[in-house]
Amino acid sequence: MSELTEMVETPADVPPGLARRVIDSDLFYSFRRSPLTMVAALVTVILVLAALLAPWIAPHDPFDPAKISIMDSLYPPVWSDGGQSGFLLGTDNQGRDVFSTILYGMRISLAVGFASVVLALFIGVTLGLIAGYVGGAVDSIIMRVADVQLTFPAILTALIIDGVARGIAGPRAYEDIVFWVLVLSIGLSFWVQYARTVRGSVLVEANKEYVLAARLIGLRPATIMFRHVLPNVLGPVLVIATINLALAIITEATLSFLGVGIPPTQPSLGTLIRIGDDFLFSGEWWITIFPGATLALLALAVNLLGDWLRDALNPKLR
Amino acid sequence: MLAFAIRRLIQAIGVMLVVAMISFVMFRFVGDPVSQLVGNDTPPAERAQLRKELGLDDPIYVQFARFVDKAAHFDFGISYQIKQPVSTLIAQRLPATLELSIVSAILALVVGMPMGVYTGLYPHSWLSRLFLAISLAGISLPTFLIGILLIFIFSVNFGMLPSFGRGDVVSLGGYWTTGLLTRTGLQSIILPSITLGLFQMTLIMRLVRGEMLEVLRTDYIKFARARGLSRRAINFGHALKNTLVPVITITGLQLGSIIAFSIITETVFQWPGMGLLFLQAVQNVDIPIMAAYLLLIAFLFTLINFIVDLLYVAVDPRIRIGGAKA
Amino acid sequence: MTAALSVRNLRVEIPTRRGVLTAIDDLSFDIAPGEVLGVVGESGAGKSITGSAIIGLLDPPGRVAGGEILLSGERIDNLSPSAMRQIRGKRIGMIFQDPLTSLNPLYRIGDQLTETILTHEAISAKAAAEKAERLLVEVGIPAAGTRMSSYPHQFSGGMRQRVVIALALAADPELVIADEPTTALDVSVQAQIIALIKRLCKDRGTSVMLITHDMGVIAETADRVCVLYAGRLAEIGAVRDVVKRAQHPYTHGLMAAIPSLIDDPNEKLEQIPGSMPRLGAIPAGCAFNPRCTYRFGRCMRERPGIYPVGASDASCFLHDASGEAPPAAVVRNAIDAGIDVRASEGAEP
């Protein structure tokens, strides 16, 4: 095996130039080789763009009470009997256009998702670097906390944080801060993986001679960490972040569905599904199925990207 | 072996103490326990009296010790919302949750393991690709969405299976209720257990597949091939046994998260278990129930972890003999 | 007499995204019954791949793309997987480089041995266990009876390699392929293991293909030696001849690069300039030509065949009596170095 790899390996004299290196890279190669990944990337880009541009492309503004009429409520999608031409995917019980609420809802879902991944990444990478580099008691404390945290599924951690925030803020103020509470509770439930990965690499890298050399020439530990060690863990961290994004979006949707997330006045995808769930039995399936399909599509596309990234960056599994 | 068990036990107690501390902090500092118990018109003097009686004026460590002592005796106080002892509420709900979780876990294991072994052995067959596609969907589809879909298909459209509740239950010895002995009970558990088990199933499948691929690349498998052993002996004897160690670990841990994840499934199917109780507690900031649930889950997790560790030892001789590190 | 193993024009290819690489190119050699053939070369020369190809365990995507492999006169390279399985272990035993990873950590030593014996012989479990114990005694495991129920991690590296040898010999194969059997071991243990392999195979009349990069091991153990360079045969011949009077410039350089205790310590070791080419970048003509001190025009254009020189065969135009002749200066240098040039001398440039 080792002999084979050694024999096949590319020569060390890689031609310079970033564009050339991207096109030549294994990553780009595996991207082009996988039609599924390309579709997933396309879907992700379209969904993210649709969410970003919601105010411009949505046919209705579902958050403006002046523009919605209860008279329009519960229209089925256009192609069904009784569908109204202005409402592509039908309307919900308050007369909001389902297509527009999905676009706006996705905005909130993606915003919570991205923000909580950034938070988790920041906390995890920082603690991982500290644990790995400082070692000793600091390391044990951080990793024990991580162990305890790992004992609980993310959704439980998020629920507890949510409940505590509710208790501290009181129901009125809670509505105003719910976005940040969600970001905090989801972000705090996902940091452990980053910390473990980063700590592991730091322990490996810190013993290598170039780090020793960097120390000997008097570089500060922080400089060594950020300039030399961090680049080595970027790959795995990126993989975790991508898969986490899908997880974070799902977690937000789940919390909102459970009724402890985004309130119905400015619904996220999860809230929309929760609202629609009540109408499933009376036959108004479109209120819940369309947001559900969007959520599934988004999570699937991001997961596919994450899967591809993991396989492409981990040659051992190829 | 004994030393190993004791070391693990001490670690487990440590984890439990940390969780107890979190529970206690929540219990003590989120909202005022006194104002939860009395009306708004209660005079301050009466409140102060109550504080004293509840021991809220004692030093924090005394209060914590009292909290731990009570928790060890399953005394978690009175629910703010329902005004009943938390332990009673949980005892009523526990059988429903455990039954659902265990049925789901068995389902996940019985279906997920063979799928994982197959996809590991034949990574390029079309069936493996199909399994992988399904598993990706299983990971990407949120649990509650799967539940809604199942209800939509099997309850709303076909009217085949019940969409909520536990069906008829039978009481066993006054402590335990089971739905597994009645027809409606069995019908009722089908959709929730699939919903709850699907995610774990895909996880187990992917894990077994990954381990299988990893092990099949090792030198000792190549050497086993070079010795001319049969495919069956290599795949199911040498390879599968070596994948079992991580599979046991993760599957065991998954059983813990199944119990926690049942919060979602119980909400979708209005399953009268602990998860539903906990969720209502979160919505109503019913801290005693939250604290008790947290402790209970941590306890179950730690217990499962401990059992998993012991199983681990039974499978891997490197840990069993002389306690050498794996 | 039929050779125990005969490899004819073997070609192994590895398809990659940058095109199909040829890992083994037109390789032929024989191993006589009871003979020990050493296979040497730098890492990446294709030694292990040759071994894997013979036993039918090439790592995918590598594949045998041409040539024949004959075991006692029967072709085995085109057998069905199940027929090949009956040859592996039974007629060809294999010893791998790393004894630490060759044994399944979760099975007892005795179980791994009896499992192998029972796969190939129709005997009772009890008889198999007895044979397993005898094998352990033979490979020099002390207290073999009690060690049967030990796990691999309870053995040292050297002891594990003895177990691996017992496993390879369990079904009394006609041929043993030993792929770097001592590389992962302590120097003090290496000699013991080599002596053990040699003794056991001699007792049983088993042929051995000993893959190594250590010329010292070859000189001590092998009857003949086959030198590989970039997946091609450079030279093959009796060990004595190749060590004393190497005929291929590469082998010649290889021998000169071995430090000797007898030599003057102040004398500089010779080394071959440059390094072996990657598979994707093998030059036209002779694969060794960029590093060769004796190269001339033809070496850059044509691929040399195999030419007999004395009792050896070498793949070098210096030994080709026909075709373009090397320049006189090259011939003189080569003769000075001890190479028996057969090509006629060309004109001075």
Image (cartoon, coloured by chain):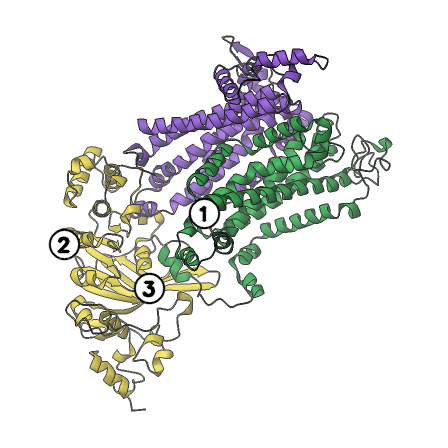
Chain colours: A green, B purple, C yellow
The residue under label 3 is C45
Say what amino acid the circle numbered 3 marks. Answer: Ala
Say what amino acid the circle numbered 1 marks. Answer: Tyr
Q: Residues within 10 Å of mark 3 (few under 14, many from 20)?
A: many
Looking at the rendering, which quadrant does residue A174 occupy? Answer: top right
Residue C262 place in picture, x, y as percent: 14, 69
Residue C11 place in picture, x, y as percent: 35, 63
Pair 2/1: label in front: 1
Count the numbered circles shown.
Answer: 3
Towards the viewer: C49 or A186: A186
Q: Can you tell which mark lies on residue A133? A: 1
The disc, 3 or 2, on the residue closer to the chain's N-terminal end is: 3
Indicate the secondary structure of the residue bearing disc 2.
Answer: helix
Towards the viewer: B105 or A65: A65
Which residue is outermost to the left?
A: C203
The reply to whether dot 3 and dot 2 touch (C-beta < 8 Å) is: no
